[in-house]
Image (cartoon, coloured by chain):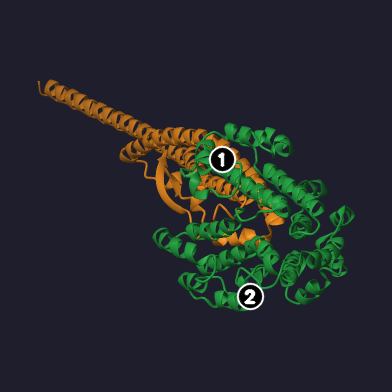
Amino acid sequence: MAEDVKPTRKNLMEIEDRIDLSERGHDTLEQKRDGLIMEFMDILDQAQDVRDDVETNYEVAQSKINKARAMEGDVAVRGAAAALKEHPEITSQSKNIMGVVVPQIESSKVRKDLDERGYGLLGSSARIDEAADAYEELLESIILAAEVETAMKKMLTEIETTKRRVNALEFKLLPDLRENQEFIEQKLEEQEREEIFRLKKIKAKKEEEEKLEAEEAREEAELGEQKVTADD
Amino acid sequence: MSSRAGSSNPEYVNARVRSRRGALFDDDDYRKMLRMGPAEIARYLEESPAYEEEINALGSRFSGVDLIEYALNRSLADDFNDILDWCQGRLYDLVARYLRQFDAWNVKTVLRGLYADADRETVDVDLIRAGEFDERRLTRLLDAATIEDVVEVLSDTIFGDPLEAAYEEYEETGVLVPLENAVDRAYYGRLSTQDLRGEALVEYREFLEAEIDFRNAINALRLARSGADIDPAEYFIDGGTLFSAADLRGLVGSPDELADRIRESRYGEELSTPLSTLDEGTSLIAFERAMEASLLEYADSLGRIHPVSVTPVVSYILAKQREVENIRAIARGKEAGLSEDEIEDELVIL
């Protein structure tokens, strides 16, 4: 690659500018990567907690509905579920964590009061209430898990991208630029040395010519003196 | 529809019921079923005279635990229809007022089916034909295209006026709660004990009062747990001895006082243990189960005090209901992979 670069001072300056910019970019990206990793670790802890909650809540909800189906009958449980048409509402917004856009999921009407569940209180039982409660709690934890896990995946992708950029700068772009810089500097030094050598040569040649001219002048002067003496 | 000609015939009905009671499953049967899978339970039921016909009739349409549950419901319905057919005069009134809980169930099932746009057949199989409604009325209910039509079909029944009154609220809110509560309130309203006079009916009256008291108590605890801003008086059922609507309004805000009131009542002895475990956040299910067991025990004793009255009939009705619930609990519990201990905890066995 270095051979492709013209070894000129202009290119050297340009490369030096690019090295400077890349080094600053590398430092910034390294800081971003480290920051993202710290944020990711926080989200990872949260995600593990949320995942544990989802698993626990799922087991509790399954157990409650199994017991409700066993004691009240499948028909009664299905009937109670059919008495409600209104679904929970989920709205998604976004927030920015170190340049990564992650979703922020807001839910409403997940938790319902006894008089909002559709089935009548007088003809139902605590088993159905508790199964409904458990499923509402499960749904809430699933919504939270969706938010946290999506944020975690997006952070992970961004960390990977930033790591690749840092590595590309550190192991490819900066070494190449430095190689080019070295190449141009070497070439320029070589050219400088050649120039000095050439100047020395010219100077020596010029001095020799001056010496010859001086000798010739001296010889001519001597010949002229001899001619005057003979005429006398 | 709420009376039948002729004089009361408790001797005849009790004799028929006694033979059926002898065929109910006992603890050993439940223990055997606890060790079986759903398919084996279905076969076990097929070998039992009480369920053989139902299992065979439904075997081609359903399988697994659904077959068991629908067969149990059908057996329950056939049994209770037989009892209503045998009853005459005053006895019919006394038994029918209790069995109307299945009419209430069927009305709510039809309402829910329409509300959820379920198809006719799905609603049909979920009906339990054990109440007073005849096949013609049930068909009209199933044919109803709208909730308004259901209200219209029921206009000449005990559910007619309450449903009509609640329909406006249903239209405003768009939820079934007012209609369902109206149906249940109509049922409990007719359970009223005021006309149950005479020595032979004392226990029956006490039993119905206990059922209403327990329903009020558990509903008050459910309301207290939910923390919802609901007026408890809206859900108060008249006819019990433990609470008045005003009492209940005050007690819902104070579950401890509510528990003390139950503890000091005539039910205190039986319910003191589940009441003591009823701390904040503890499941109400154990308490509900204890009340069911207490009610069943009470009903069981009814049959022995006045052998020639309505009480042995009601006692059998409750025992049959409990049998159906226990078999269903075992089968559904097995299907869900619950352990034998977990299922046994859910069973109410005397």
Which chain did the renderer colour orange?
Answer: A
In this rendering, would A146 be left or right of A71?
Answer: left
In this rendering, would B22 be left or right of B208?
Answer: right
In this rendering, would B52 be left or right of B112?
Answer: right
Depth check, front residue: A211 or B301: B301
Which chain did the renderer colour green?
Answer: B
Q: Which mark is residue B225?
A: 1
In the rendered image, which quarter contains the C terminus of chain A? top left
The picture quadrant where one finds residue A181 is top left
Marks 1/2: CA–CA distance = 39 Å
The picture quadrant where one finds residue B123 is bottom right
What chain does badge 2 belong to?
A: B
Residue at 75 percent across and 64 percent down: it is B65
Depth check, front residue: A212 or A13: A13
Q: Amino acid at mark 1?
A: Arg
Residue at 74 percent across and 68 percent down: it is B83
Point out residue B64 in the picture as x, y percentages from the top left corner.
77, 66
Q: Secondary structure at mark 2?
A: loop
Point out residue A25 in the picture as x, y percentages from the top left corner.
40, 36
Q: Amino acid at mark 2?
A: Asp
- Reading the image, the residue beneath label 2 is B134
**Looking at the image, is mark 1 or mark 2 nearer the viewer?**
2
The picture quadrant where one finds residue B70 is bottom right
Whether marks 1 and 2 lie on the same chain: yes
Q: How many marks?
A: 2
Q: Secondary structure at mark 1?
A: helix
